[in-house]
Amino acid sequence: MAEPARGDTLMAPPPAARQEPDEAPAASRPGARMNSLARALAPASIAVLGASDNPHKAGGRPIAFMRQYGFQGRIYPVNPGRAEVQGLRAYASLADLPERPELALVAVGGAEGLKLVEQCAAAGVGTVVVVASGYAEAGEAGRLLQERMLAACRAGGTRLVGPNCQGLSNFSNGAIANFSTIFHEQPGRDGPLAIIGQSGAATQSVYALAQARGIHARYVHATGNEADVTAAELLLETVEDAEVRAVVLYVEALGDPETLARAAARAAARGIAVIGVKSGRTANGQRAASSHTGAMATEDRVIDAFFARHNIIRAVDPYEAVSVAALCIGTPRPRGRNLVVMSNSGASCVMGADTADELGMPLLRFGPEVARRLEQAMPAFSSASNPVDLTGALLNDRALFPGVLEVLAGVEDVHLLMVSFPVAGSGYDVEGYADALARFAAGRGIALAVSAYQEPVREAFARRGLVVFGREREALRALNTYAAYAEGLRRLAARAVAPAPAVPDLPAGASGTLDEAQSLQFLRDAGIATIPFALCEDAEAAVEAARRLGGEVVLKGCSPDIPHKSEHGLVALGLATPDRIREAAARHAETIRALGARHSGALVARMLKGGREMALGARLDPVFGPVVLVGDGGIYLEALKDFRLLVPPFTEAEVAEALSRLRVAPLFAGLRGEPPADLAAFCRMAVRLGEVMLRFHGRIASVDINPVKLMAVGEGAFALDAVIELAAAAPP
């Protein structure tokens, strides 16, 4: 075939339109133009710049992999020093290619790599994958090279993957623009898993662990420095693939939360589990600040809240991620959390019950008819209860195991089943057990896990497509995570966040920190219940305000410059006489003047006795936007840190669920004759605060409401103290 004229071949077309998440996937839109990332995963042609004849070098492995894995597109090695590379014709430069490649892989680093990327961008190559290093990760000089690389790509409408990355891999079509050595050692095969990460080593770890479980990955993508294309963008593209059932996502920094949220929503709509491994969980990596509730939304807790908001499963490491992925791929999604534990060991039954209780997994109580049928199927000396102890009789009675499964098959309320065989060696009908369990699992909406210490036992069950674990605890933790994910999907489907009512504007000309009176008034006007209060210019006005409020009052010195009044003796409690009110007001005014602060007046509030002190706060996270804190309150909040974070918008039910996870949660029901707390009132306050933060996105930096007095059920919840900090500058 004659080569087209070079000028015609390499003329850049207009940049392709980006596919929105609600569009049909490119593969299902005949004749539709694929976006650049979709085409990068299924390119018709790939150029390798810096191609090597050595299949063990970064410029040689991708070519070897594409030939090994049956890439049907055109491969163009570019190497000015060779006429042939790995049996393929080589070209001296990009300009010498017979066509403009849809994807280019650059295996040359530093300034020379920059030149090659600039050539690709000028030629209109859709996507460039830079596997070479020597850029932002290498210091200031490298960072400048990377910035120039990105600028060239943006000018040319080219997407940039990397640099300093291992690249993209698609085992469904053999497009392996990736130099990972593991594809030599553990050959890839198309499967239902996708692996996406910023770290090449982490993606390899997940790949190896998944293969050890017999799970194969269709996609393995590592994004490196993420100068342009992010892991979240690749996730958004990947979840459009109908063959993908689970994605393991490894991230070290989340700089693209909006795209990640869109991808998670699309994954949820398509029933694809996203399992995130986010490093940096420890205090040293969090840069926590504890000056007030808004600042206590530390980085890692915010990520937990963000993942929970979008039903992304969070795993602590690749091993846990793959364990959960095995269930997401290998078992039906559970309809609930009712658990049955079964074993031929009484000890395993007891330990399984302990673990279930620790994890909050309800062991299903069998009804009378089910118990009667189990008694008929089991030995006379065993108990027809849950956990189901098959006892040592399993060794001699081959009908025992299938008989018990037959009884459980008729129990609609079984959602999770963990079967443990801590010992099943010679004499045990392991193959028969595996056959029976596989028949039981077929067609039932039960999430099922098998635990066995012995590898041959695990292998027998794995051959039947069942999900196996080496320990009961590991199996139960994975089942619990999977059940929580399924609950999250149902919650997302049922979520109905009501339209936010009107919110008052901020005080005219306000800046910096509002004083307490301004903060409380704004919250009250926004529909958040506050304690009755009045701001008074002088001591006599404070006396009159106390008379109107009735009973004992609290008097505080009010200043926008002193957000934490108790530290300066500016709070007086239980005042009941005019003289004490006058004395406190005068003392507070003198203290504020001595501190060189502005004096707004004396804030007089009704003294509210009883109830429990809670904390409610919010902050504008620089990456994730508004985040709301709910937790135990009072002066020990910063020390005990018994709180949860939520990303708005959220519902009252979600606030209640977060409160149920606090250490103090058992106290809300009322103990030793105390009435239960009015959690519904607190939940309404939290939802409203989330709405306020969304309404003033970028204008309110933080809100600190501590304490909130949580009264007995039916009596409400009230903000006693509040500080609102405005952002330094409104967003453009």
Image (spheres, helix red, strand yellow):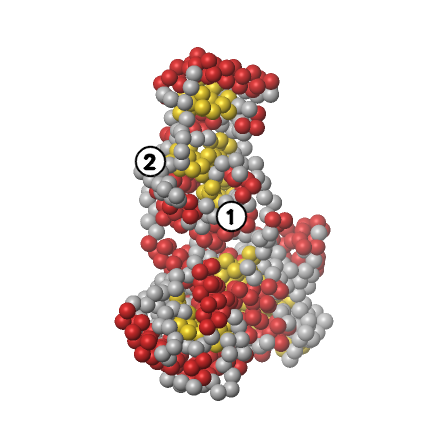
Q: Quadrant of residue 62?
A: bottom right
Question: Which residue is rendered at x = 40% and y = 85% of the image?
Answer: 397
Q: Position of residue 467 (x, y in %)?
A: 46, 73
Task: Name the side, left or right, on which 709 lies relative to 103.
Answer: left
Foreground: 563 or 312? 563
User: Picture coordinates of residue 458 (x, y %)?
Assistant: 50, 78
* Residue found at x 32% / y 68%: 366
The image quadrant that residue 504 belongs to is top left
- Residue ID for mark 1: 302
Q: Is residue 33 visible?
A: no
Note whether 140 is above or below 9 in the view shown.
Answer: above
**Relative to the observer, which residue lies in front, 177 or 44?**
177
Indicate the amino acid at tag 1. Answer: Val
The answer, for residue 482, to whether it is visible in the render is yes
Q: Residues within 10 Å of mark 1 (few under 14, many from 20)?
A: many
**Along the polypeptide, which appears first: circle 1 or circle 2?**
1
User: In the rendered structure, are the residues bearing label 1 and label 2 in contact, judged by CB atoms less than 8 Å apart?
Assistant: no
Q: Residue at x 57, y 36 (%)?
A: 291
Residue 641: assigned label: none
Residue type, mark 2 in image: Glu
In the drawing, what numbered circle is on residue 715? 2
Which mark is in front, 1 or 2? 2
Query: Residue 673 placed where, x, y %?
Result: 36, 42
Residue farthest along the front direction in this orientation: 381
| C-alpha distance separating marks 1 and 2 | 32 Å
Relative side of 213 to 240, left or right: right
